[in-house]
Each structure stands twice: as C-alpha cells, then as structure tokens.
Image (spheres, grey):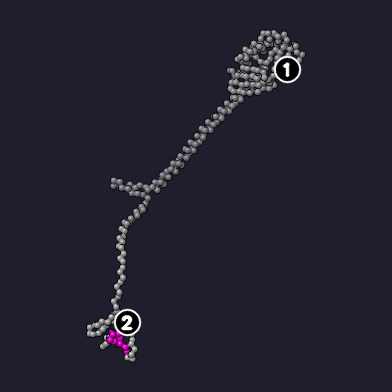
Amino acid sequence: MSDPDDTPTDDQGGPAAPAGGTAVPAPVANRTRFATPGGRSRFSAPPAPPAPPTTAEPAVTPAPAEPSVTPARAEPVAAAVERVGGSRRIEPDRAERGDRAERAEQVESRGNSPRLILAGLGALAVVLAVLVAFLAQTLSRSGNQEDRRQEALDASRDNVRAILAYDYRHLDQDYAAARAVITGPLRKEYDTTAATKKMSQDRVALKASLSSEVLNAAIETSNADRATALVFVNRSVRGSVFATPQVTLDRIEMTMVRQHGTWLVEKLQMR
C-alpha cells in the first residue's frame, strides 16, 4: 500500500515530471521536506511568523464602589412613633398639626368676628358722638356769635337815638336816658358838653328839640363783648328861631362794650 503523501520527486526534491516530459509544479509552495521513519519524506507547512510585540496597557485600579444607601421607607400612617422611657407616644406629623392649627384659627376667627364687628361699631359710635358734639358746639358758638352780633346791631340803633335826642320840655329825663347807654370817658364828656346847665337854659329859651332817625346801621367788627357799629342818622332840629326843621345827615361810628348783658356806648364820633 502506497502512502498518499508519497509523490515522485526529482533530484532536487521536487515532484517528478510525468511521462511525456512536462513538469507539473508543486501544488503547495514553501513546504519543508523531512524524512519520516521508514525513509519516507513528508512536507509540512512553514512555521507561523512570530506575533508582533504588544504594548501592555497600564493597569487601572477600579474606584471603590460607594456604599449603596437604601432610602427610608415612608411611614404608612401620618404619625411618628417615639419611645420615651419604654412607652410609646404618637405625635402627629407636621402636616396634620398645620391642618389642626389652621382649623383652630378659622374657628377662633369666626368666634371673634362678632366681637370685632361690635368693637368696630362701638368705636364708630364714639367717633360719631364726638363729631356730633363738636358740630353742636360749633353751631352753638356760631349761633351765640350771631345772636351777640344782632344784639349789638339793635343796641346801636337804640343808643344813638337816646344820645342824640332831647326836648326842652323834659331835659332832665332825656339826659338820664342818654347817660344810661353811655359808659367810660364818654359819660364824663357828655356831662361837660351836652348836659350842662347853660345848655339847658338856652334850649328852654329857644324851645329847642332834637330827634334822630336811623336810616341804616351795620356792625363792622364784633366779638363776644365788643363791637363797632356804623350808623347813618338824620338829625332834625326844631326851635323858635327856625321856621322849618333843620335836617342833617350824619354818619356816626360807635364803639360799644357789653356789660352785665347790656351793650353800652364807649366811644362816639362823627365821620
């Protein structure tokens, strides 16, 4: 039996040419021929080239893994259990406490609402009372001032008629009426000018009389106890020496003061 690897060869170790003279190339190149036991030759594949040297990667030390933290499990109920001296006390959580506080505030606010309303109404009533009292006082003061002003105006009319009037038939009575509405230095001046004995004798001899008609009057200034009035007067003088009454228009300014509830003339002058 022939070895399948036994192929005829020539002197150079290559395959022998077949009959006819044509050489057949070797089917496998670079094979090494070697002898096997028994004198047979075999071909083997050339050894593989050595692998190129590789550069070793630096060793990397892995970072230590962080310890895993297991999240705390939420409590199934809204309460925290606290052990105190071996006993258990249940404390409501913050949300529940907040809800209770809010409900308590709402209840308290509803309970305080009527009180606040009553307090506000009470304060408003006090303010209104003070305002009414102030208005009443103001109106009263204003009314009093207006009354005093009107009193002074009426007194100015009456006083000027009393001072600027006389009749030779009752001079003493007329003088007394004039003195009754005059005060201060004006009374002394009246006694030394208008009510003298000599003046009285002349008026009797001439059968003289004087009357005054108030045309208009106005208050220029006034306060509680003092006023200035301007009076327009027609003075009419009659006597045996006059065929007709002698009429003159006078503008008289009077300063009056209030004494014991009566307005008296303190100063009188023609203007």
Sequence order check, earlier mark of 2 and 1 = 2
187, above or below 79, in the image: above
> In the rendered view of the protein, which quadrant contains the N terminus?
bottom left
- Pointer 2 and pointer 1: residues touching (CB < 8 Å)? no
Q: Nearer the viewer, residue 236 or 23?
A: 23
Q: Which residue is mark 2?
A: 28
From the viewer's perspective, is 93 left or right of 156?
left
Q: Nearer the viewer, residue 216 or 126?
A: 216
Q: Residues within 10 Å of mark 1 (few under 14, many from 20)?
A: some
Q: Residue at x 31, y 64 (%)?
A: 57
Q: Nearer the viewer, residue 172 or 108?
A: 172
Q: Residue at x 36, y 49 (%)?
A: 79
* Number of numbered discs visible in the structure rendering: 2
Residue 121 x/y as whole percent: 50, 36
The numbered mark at residue 180 is: none
Report the Cα–Cα distance between label 2 and label 1: 178 Å
Q: Amino acid at mark 1?
A: Val
| Magenta span | 9-18
Q: Name the quadrant containing residue 231.
A: top right
Q: Nearer the viewer, mark 2 or mark 1?
A: 2
Q: Which residue is mark 1?
A: 247
Residue 106 x/y as whole percent: 44, 43
Residue 53 x/y as whole percent: 30, 69
Residue 76 x/y as whole percent: 36, 53
